[in-house]
Amino acid sequence: MRALFDFFVKHGSAFLFIVLEGVSLLLLFTLSESRNAAIMTSAGNISGSILKIRSSIGQYFSLKDENTALAIENSLLRERLWQYESDSAFMAREQMETLLSNPEQTVLARVIDNSTRHDDNFVTIDRGTIDGVEEGMGVYDSHGAVGVVMIAGSRYSIVLPILNSRTSLSCKIRNTDQLGFVEWKGGSVYEALLIDIPYQSNVQIGDTVQTSGFSWAFPEGLMVGTVAWVKHRQNANTLDIGVTLASELNNLGWVFVHQGTPNEEIEAISELILQQNN
Amino acid sequence: MKVILFFRRFVTLLLFVLLQVFVFGRINLFGYAAPLFYVWMILHMESHMSRSAVLLWSFFLGLAVDVFTATPGLNAATATLTGFLQPVAMNISTRIDRHDTLRPSCESMGWRRFMLFSMSLIFIHILVYFILRGTPEQNTGIFVTSVLSSFAITFTLVFFIDLAFSEKADNRPV
C-alpha cells in the first residue's frame, strides 16, 4: 500500500497530465457540437455577457456607419414598397401579407462576436432558448442568409455561418430553379461555392442564388448571393459556381433568426434514409 | 505570501485570456497566421513551481480561452501538453539542476537559450493546435502554411516583446 502511495506521489504529475488531457479531448470531441457545449463556449452566460459589453462599446464607435447603412437600406425598402404597391399579382401580395401578419416568426438579435479569419468561423448572437431560438434555425440579415444556429444557450447562441467548412446550405438559382449546395472552402470572406449544379445548366454570371426552402431553417427565396464565375468541375458532370455573398459576413450588426417549424414527418423520413445509408 | 502569488498569477491569467480573445485572436495575417500569444504565460512559469501546478495553470488558461470560442477543449488540450513539456524544456535549456528560482526569459537565460527554449515549445504548441483543429478537406498545403506562419508570428511576438523588456539580454551562463 505504501509502495502504491509512493508510486502515485512520484508520478503524480504524469497522472494529472493524463487526466487533464483526457478531459480536454473529451470536451473537444464530444461536446463541440452538442447542446451541453453552450456553457463551455461563447453561448455561455458569463462569456456571452463579456462579449456583449465589448460589442456594445464597438457598436457605439460605429454608429455613424450604421446610420449610413440604415439610410441606404431605408431608401431601398421604400423603392421595393412602391414596386409592391404597383404589383397587381394577387398571390405575391397574399404571400407578403401572410409573412407580415406573423412577426413572431423572426427574432431580432445582435451579433456580439464574429470571427471570419479561421477555416471554421462562428457568430455569437445575444438571443437564446428563452427568446425562442433553437438549434437548426436559419439566421439572416437585411442583405441575405448568414448561417444556421448550431448551439442555443439560454441567453446566447452560436451560429454556424456560411464561412464555415461544415456549413452546407440548400440553394437554387432563381432563373433556372436548379438545386445545389452553397459551401465555403476558405479564402475570400465575400465568396462561397455553389456545387452540384448539372453541367448542362444555363447559368449566367450575375444570376441570383437563393435558398431552396427544402430545409425548415430558411424560407424559400431568401437571397444568398449572385453568380460570380462558372467552371466545369473536372471528371464530373457538375459545375463549380463562385457566389458573391449578399451578406457582408465580416461586418454583421443586427440579424434575424427565422423561427421555422420542422416538419416532423419529413425529418423522420430523412433520418430513416440516413440510417439505411449507414 | 502564497495567497498573493496565487492572486497575481490569477490576474495574469485573466489578462492573457482577454489579450488573446480580444486582441491577438482577431489578427489573421494572410488568412493563415493566427498568433496564440497566451502561450507566453506557460513559457514564463517559474522553475520552483511543481509540475502539477504548471499543468493546472496551463489547463485552466487554455480552458478560459476556449470559453470565449466555440471550440471547447482545443486550447485546453494544447496548453496542457505545453505545460507538461515546459519544465522538461527548461531543464534541457539550462542544462544544470537548479535549486533557486528561475523565471525563463531573455534576461535570466540569455537570448540564445531562451530562443531555443521558446522556439521548441511554441512550435509544439502550434503544431498540436492545428492537428487537433484540423483543416478544410485535410489540405496539407493549408496545414503546413498555417503551422509555419502561426509559429513565426507567435514566436516573433513572444521573443521580441521579452527581449524589449529585458534589461540585460546578454548570453551569460545560468
Image: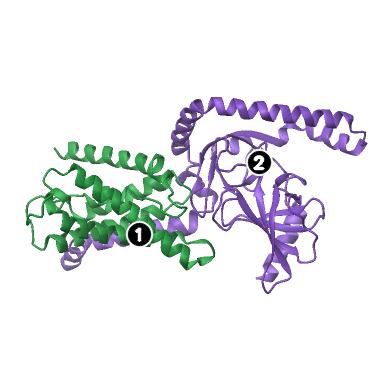
According to the rendering, which colour does chain A have? purple
**In which quadrant is the C terminus of chain B drawn?**
bottom left
**In which quadrant is the N terminus of chain B drawn?**
top left
Mark 2 and mark 1 in contact (Cβ < 8 Å)? no
Q: Residue at x 41, y 48 (%)?
A: B66
According to the rendering, which colour does chain B have? green
Per the image, the residue denoted by label 2 is: A140
Pointer 2 indicates a residue of which chain? A
Type of amino acid at the residue the image marks with label 1: Glu
Type of amino acid at the residue the image marks with label 2: Tyr
- Above or below — where is B169 with respect to B14? below
Query: Would residue B40 be found to the left or right of residue A114 on screen?
Result: left
- Badge 2 marks a residue whose secondary structure is strand
Pointer 2 local density, CA inside 10 Å: few below 14, some 14–19, many at least 20: many
Pointer 1 local density, CA inside 10 Å: few below 14, some 14–19, many at least 20: many
Query: Would residue B55 be found to the left or right of residue B113 on screen?
Result: right
Whether callout 1 and callout 2 share a subunit is answered yes
Quarter of image, res A138: top right
- Badge 1 marks a residue whose secondary structure is helix
Q: Residue at x 60, y 48 (%)?
A: A190
Query: Would residue A245 be found to the left or right of residue B21 on screen?
Result: right
Per the image, the residue denoted by label 1 is: A21
